[in-house]
Amino acid sequence: MSRAEVLASVDIVALRLNPAGALDLLLIRRARAPFADRWALPGVLVNGRCADPSLDAAAERALHDKARLRPQHLEQVATVGNARRDPRGWSLSTFYLALVAPATTLEDEDLRFVALDEVLHGRLALPFDHAELVAQAHERLAGKAVYSSLPLHLLAPRFTVTEALAAFQACLGQAVQHTTLRGRLERMKSAGWILDTGERQQPRMGRPQRVLEQRPGAGGVYLFDRSVLS
């Protein structure tokens, strides 16, 4: 790479809620140097030869081409760049947070989900500065989970309050009061963002639970008037 060149990429921090109520992170095995055969975030290079009309389009291409996934939520987190993050020289990465459906499965052996905590706590090392990108994206998710419905994008379109509670607690890393969250969901229902289907789901233990259905508005994320932790 010449001194005039700067590598530019779009990288994806894609998260899934697993059956145990914890977050999983999507990784891809790199096919070429640098860091060939290492597990890393899925991403694509962007330059004048790419057909992407925007960074958002490049992010969607990264998920579709690399993982055959369509996210339920996708947002740009930040852009980072320096001469140290890539051994090839100066590089920039615009990275995105993607939330995918809980039933998402992978068919390619070069893709896998790992426990997010393994990366956040340094038990699983990633190449480049990908661990830092994961931490920043998780911080964005946790911050928005306090005052918005963003964690619901980790659920199936139809869900129960208990499932919603698991999603919020996974994003925040702490307990949320059941009655507090129920109140937030009731406000969403009154605003037309959630529909009560009239159906009931029978858990293995406990009372039948109402089945709700998401009807997100144009912005995709409902903002609460108070913190979900209050």
Image: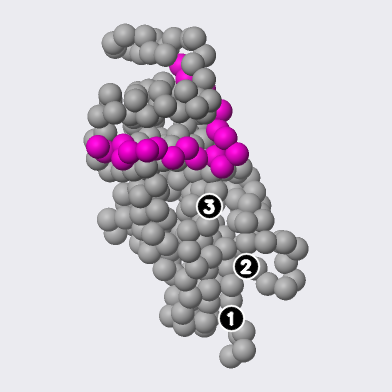
Q: CA distance from mark 3 to mark 1?
A: 24 Å
Is residue 203 among the parts visible in the rendering? yes
Write down the region rendered in magenta: 211-230
At x 74% / y 71%, what residue is drawn? 49
* Nearer to us: label 2 or label 3: 3
| Mark 3 residue type | Glu
The residue positioned 50% from the left and 68% from the top of the image is: 79
Please name the predominant secondary structure of the magenta segment in the image: loop
Which residue in the protein does label 3 denote? 75
Badge nearest the viewer, 3 or 1 = 3
Density class for disc 1 (Cα within 10 Å; few <14, some 14-19, many ≥20) is some
Task: Name the residue tied to disc 1.
Answer: 6
Please provide percent x and percent y for residue 50: 72, 66
In the image, is 85 to the left or to the right of 50? Answer: left
Q: Quadrant of the N terminus?
A: bottom right
- Disc 2/disc 1 C-alpha distance (Å): 11 Å
